[in-house]
Image: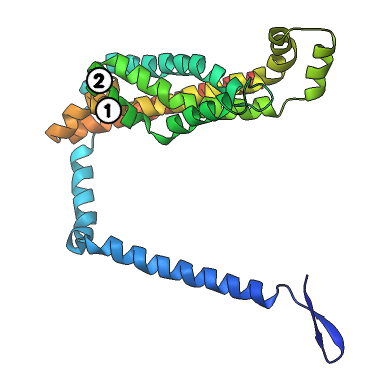
Amino acid sequence: MPVTPQDGRLLWQRRTPLAQWAIWFGWLALAVLFVFSWQVMNKNTIWLFVEDAPRQAADLLSRAWPPRWSYLDRLWGPLWDTINIATLGTGLGIVLATPVAFLAARNTTPSAALLRPLALLIIVASRSINSLIWALLLVAIIGPGLLAGIIAIALRSIGFIGKLLYEAIEEIDETQVEAVRATGASGWQIMDYAVWPQIAPAFAGISVFRWDINIRESTILGLVGAGGIGLQLQYPLCALAWAEVTVIFIVILATVAVSEWVSAKVRAAII
């Protein structure tokens, strides 16, 4: 807390003059950035379309309601495929992410100079690419279908599960590890009796939470040919069959709500 002399007294100030100028400069830079971003946004914006947007939205909603419930019978198979994509993709992601997490954690990695940076690179690469992009690449490599969606979900899950799990590993109580090591236990026994019991609740919670997220992400993978209900959504969108699109949206919303409820119940029972 800076103080400055004034009339022979010390006057308290919240910030030094240099800090105050730095704050004003920061606000000025933010204002300049806002003006620049606004100009970039307006450069290609056709404001006549924006003004007409409410009328267009009302017209679309009038064609989308009421839903065409007869279309519901064609959605059960794709919906089941979507659940399978999310579940199998999550399982594969867990299998791949677990060893990566142990290699990334400072207290369990065999090599902090080589293997830990490599594991962190895998985690960052997985988290940097959206599952839809993974699916697009895999459809081009192995062809359309459920397999591309499953692998895309798994590759996306590695980063999420690996990051949260290695942070949980680094937060364990080291005194328990030292106690087990003092008995002469091997490295695998230390993992089994000291490390794993401490991270098991977090591991279960992370896995269920990621499955819940994957249910949502797998609903759109079909738009690029990776199967599931997203593939069924593509046809009505191309045909402008908005009443059928509404049915699909309702089914997706119900599925996500159920998965959220299941995830919350399982995590509450585990943690």
Q: Find the residue positioned furthest to the front.
A: 113
Going by the numbered disc 2, the residue's amino acid type is Ile
Residue 183's place in the image compared with 130, above or below, is: above
**Quadrant of residue 85 in the image?**
top left
Q: Is 16 located above or below residue 261 in the figure?
A: below
Residue at the far right in the pictured view? 8
Dot 1: element: helix
User: Front-most of 67 and 228?
Assistant: 228
Q: Residue at x 43, y 16 (%)?
A: 87
Q: Single out the mark in the foreground, 2 or 1.
A: 2
Q: Identify the residue under disc 2.
A: 141
Name the residue at 51% across, 27% down. Answer: 118
Mark 1 = which residue? 136
Foreground pick, 226 / 24: 24
Residue at the image point whose x is 75% and y is 76% from the top = 13
**How is the model colour-coded?**
rainbow
Residue 88 falls in which quadrant of the image?
Answer: top left
**Residue sitting nearer the eye, 190 or 61:** 190
